[in-house]
Amino acid sequence: MARILTVRDGRLRYVQSISVGPHALQADEPVNAGGNDAGPNPYELLLAALGSCASITVRMYAERKQWPLEGVHAELSWTRIHAEDCADCDSNLQLADGIDIELVLLGNLSEEQRRRLIEIANRCPVHRTLSSQVPIRTRAASGNV
């Protein structure tokens, strides 16, 4: 069963305190967005979740196959891109979110192994979640939390 993740606003403008079991971290907005840059912004946390999941999944797969993977480095970026399929792009600006992942696979791997590890990275649980339609239910809680 997954641990409950709690997010509470902090004393500074947009700083959020995040706790997951015994782990604590914080999120914030950059200075140019009115924050204090006291932690990663929410999109950076999302990218961290995706990158760490992809790296862990690749590592687990390579270990199971006993492939000579020595390390995985992931670089991720999030951008808003112009949607290619918009019907009337000149009068109605259409943007879509896009995530780019660059994986560096260290070790004496064949090209076929590298290709397969990239496929596996694209099947990690967080990637699958982000690629699917996930229902998100938000409700107001009564009382103090």
Image: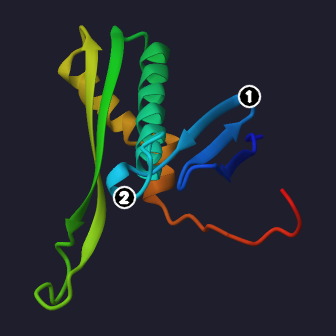
Along the line of sight, which residue is nearer the eye, 90 or 69? 90
Q: Nearer the viewer, mark 1 or mark 2?
A: 2
Which of disc 2 and disc 1 is earlier in sequence?
Answer: 1
Q: Is residue 32 left or right of residue 56?
A: left
Which residue lies under the disc numbered 1?
22
| Mark 1 neighbour density, 10 Å: few (under 14) some (14–19) many (20 or more) | few
Name the mark on residue 33. Answer: 2
The spot of residue 130 in percent (x, y) is: 46, 55
- Residue at horizontal 46 percent and vertical 23 percent from the top: 61
Name the secondary structure under disc 2: helix
Q: Residue at x 21, y 64 (%)?
A: 81
Q: Secondary structure at mark 1?
A: loop
Q: Quadrant of residue 25?
A: top right
Instruction: Tell me the tag on residue 82.
Output: none
What amino acid is labelled 2 in the image? Ala
Q: Quadrant of the C terminus?
A: bottom right
Side (left or right) of 25 relative to 92: right
- Image coordinates of residue 21 in percent, x first then y, are 75, 33
